[in-house]
Image (cartoon, coloured by chain):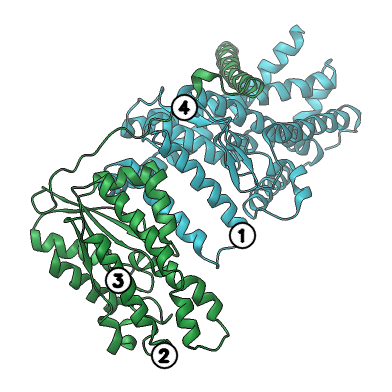
Chain colours: A green, B cyan
Amino acid sequence: MSEMTNRKIGIALAAGSLLATAFMIAGLCFVAIDMAAPAAAEQKPEETGNAADAGSLVPYREAEEIRLLALGDSLTKGTGDATGQGYVRRVADGLSKRYNKPVKLLGNLAINGMTAQELAERLERDEGYQYAVKGANLIVFSIGGNDLFLSAYASLNGRELNEAAIDELAGDLDEALERFKRVVERLNALNPNASVVYMGLYNPFFELEELRGASAKLQDWNRAAYSELFRHPQMLMVPTFDLFEFRVLDYLSSDHFHPNEAGYERIAERMLDSL
Amino acid sequence: MLKLFALTQNEIVKLWLKKRFYVIILILLIIIPIFTYAEHKLAQTNAEHFPDWRNRILQQIADIENTLASDRIPEEWKRGRRIAVQQLQYYLDHDINPSEPSGVQFTREFLGNSVTLFIPMLVLAIGSDIVSGERTGGTIKMLLTRPVKRWKVLLSKLLALALYVSLTIAATVILCYLISGFVFGYGGWSAPVLAGFKIEGSSVDSASVYAVPQWRFLLMQAGLSWYSAMTVAALGLMTSVLLRSTAASMVSMMAAVIAGSILSSMSSAWTTAKYLFSVNLNLSGYLVGTPPPIEGMTLPFSACVLAVWGAAAIGVAFRVFTKGDILN
């Protein structure tokens, strides 16, 4: 290569790289400016409040597609199901077969260990949740198990199981119901057009003679929950307690608390029967 | 002064004729389409399952919260995830899609992910034989017997290297944009990006968060990547002066860089590790609010650490190069 072309390459490279360096330094200057004078007022992102309303005025039966949203605790999450489907995906699959139209699962927002208190708060404050609820035309949810069991379950560990424990098990029934009521009212206020299905509670401890009494307490919960739900004609309660009484071992997973695949299958069938 | 300019230009041409830069372009031309394809696949699945990005973010938050509920996850990991939840929530509350696919967005992601390993590797590919190569080739004697002061020789090499660092980052940005834009579209310059998340423990202070247009963010990110790449280049120059073999200087620098990225990902309890240069390379992470590898690290802190390491490396390199005996 001749001396001349080398010179030309050299000048071109020098010019190009100096230009690039200038850009890099400009970038660094921006960083320095932003650090020196943080967040000018006009740059503040606005709270938009997710104004966009996905609008779901049409009930799921008539709609072109079913937009399913799942909320709640580990039962909706599908904990204990080795296939990871839970009852939610099974219901989604079943509905798309029955109605022969697409079922869009907007999301399964269930979180292990969620209590009615947390769900109510999210529905009241979290705009993302509200947005999702407004966009759905079918909502399935389960809640309350953690309110009733969690504290008791923890304190039961390593203690004698007895009648007193059962009382404890449902000690917070009234408080929990109050929170459940908030959840229901909130769902109704956010989207009165969506059909809502609540999964009733069951007693996972039925096989333990000492804790069989909890079943009666759970029925108190289920009855009270129903009396909140039936005020809203679009809401439905699907009972599950009977499934798990004789066949606890067949339908519960190894943690003796959550259903297994077969258990979720039964729950999904129940829901599909009434949808 | 004129001599220095001529020397630098000479070094630039020498580096060019070594064809290293071609290799870098070639590597970029192979790697970027691969990542573009991967990103495209991801965007496709996302679009299929979540036509509305808000529901995707909501699901993402729920998924992270489920891992938070698990006792099996170590507390240090939970910290990062708690921060991620708060940031996602903030994006959701302000109705800003954190990853609207576009050419600019892809470039931003690529640059952010390559700053700790990939770009240092490219820089070392250019620079690690800048002095040692002259020794192995035997040209060093010729260079030093000329009537030019030794420090000028080394300074010209340093300047040439610095310019190539700029070129490398510019090439990365431009190629990323051109290639990924073919798939994701060439827009996205003005899309808002949130910067300025302040992290305290495992919570995010959103008081100082502000929105910047993506072009500005990209420029800031390029500047910060350039800054860390320059530190690596200075250290590369030093090892190239200190070690005779090019392979040895390349390997030792890569080892240092890789060790840093492993240390960062371990989010170690060994807090003095924050004074190592390679733990501090991810400067642009501070902009988006990635939790720092070690608690207490901030952008000014990392910038200072890198500056000290770079200055020390240059000092050592000049000292050894001008005072030491040059033997083959």
Mark 4 vs mark 2: tell me if same chain: yes
* Parent chain of label 4: A
| Residue of label 2 | A208
Quarter holding the C terminus of chain A is bottom left
Q: Amino acid at mark 2?
A: Leu
Q: Amino acid at mark 1?
A: Glu
Find residue A47 and report its image quarter: top left
Q: CA distance from mark 3 to mark 1?
A: 37 Å
- Outermost residue to the top: B2
From the viewer's perspective, is A262 left or right of B324?
left
Disc nearest the viewer among 3 and 4: 3
Q: Please name the residue shown 80% across and 29% down the image.
A: B311
* Parent chain of label 2: A
B27 in relation to B170, above or below = below
Label 4 crowd (10 A; few <14 / some 14-19 / many >=20): many
Label 1 crowd (10 A; few <14 / some 14-19 / many >=20): few
| Residue of label 3 | A222
| Residue of label 4 | A45
Q: CA distance from mark 2 to mark 3?
A: 21 Å
| Residue of label 1 | B75
Q: CA distance from mark 2 to mark 1?
A: 35 Å
- The tag earlier along the polypeptide, 3 or 4, is 4
Q: Is residue B137 visible?
A: no
From the viewer's perspective, is B116 left or right of A56?
right
Mark 3 vs mark 1: tell me if same chain: no
